[in-house]
Amino acid sequence: MRLTVAAALLTLSGVPAGAAYLVDFGSGDRMTVDSYWEEGDRVHLMRDGVELSVPRTRIQRLQEVEGGGSAPAPRRAESGPSRAQAPRRQESREELEARQRHVERHLLRVQQERFEAQNRGEPTERLSRDFRHTQEKRRAVIQELERQAP
């Protein structure tokens, strides 16, 4: 259920996506993502700074989209009365700055953990992926702040 809700939110968000990959879940469920990476039996999908982790078996096809245009949201029959989607609320500058501080603190924690694990001789693959992923989130927040700049 959480997967369906998360996929629906990402697919139906009102913000145009600069997506580069089309993910086909089968049965008409599709979404576009900015990037993805595979980890074990899971695929991590990234769109507008939001990560969605799904089992690899859930994805029927994953293909690169030319030009990075977003695919149209699939038409689905609804069981209840139809409701108009509320437009995505734009975050205020203060909210974005708070999110940037949160992401940057997390980035520093991950960097510290990675450094300590490396010094102990432990594997750092997971921490390196988390570090790269957090850097992507930070870039997305900074870009959003630049768009709001007066």
Image (spheres, helix red, strand yellow):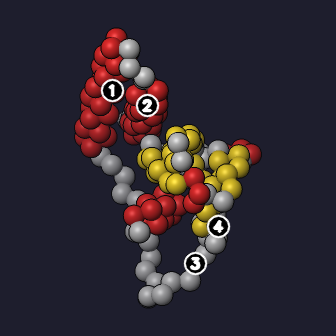
Residue position for label 4? 26
Q: Quadrant of residue 58?
A: bottom right
Give yes or no for contact between labels 2 and 3 (Cβ–Cβ under 8 Å): no
| Image quadrant occupied by the C terminus | top left
Q: Earlier in the sequence, mark 1 or mark 4?
A: 4
Q: Quadrant of residue 140?
A: top left
Camera-side mark, 2 or 3: 2
Q: Nearer the viewer, residue 74 or 1?
A: 1
Q: Kindly give the residue lying farthest to the top in the view shown.
A: 119
Residue position for label 1? 110
Q: CA distance from mark 3 to mark 4?
A: 13 Å
Q: CA distance from mark 2 to mark 1?
A: 10 Å
Give yes or no for contact between labels 4 and 2 (Cβ–Cβ under 8 Å): no
> Is residue 93 found left or right of 2 in the rendered image?
left
Residue position for label 3? 76
Q: Nearer the viewer, residue 131 or 127?
A: 127
Give the crowd class for mark 1: few <14, some 14-19, many >=20 residues within 10 Å: some
Give yes or no for contact between labels 1 and 3 (Cβ–Cβ under 8 Å): no
Q: Amino acid at mark 4?
A: Gly
Circle 2: element type: helix
The residue shown at (42%, 36%) is 137
Q: Earlier in the sequence, mark 2 or mark 1?
A: 1
The image shows residue 13 at horizontal and vertical percentages of 48, 59
The residue shown at (44%, 76%) is 84
- The numbered mark at residue 126 is 2
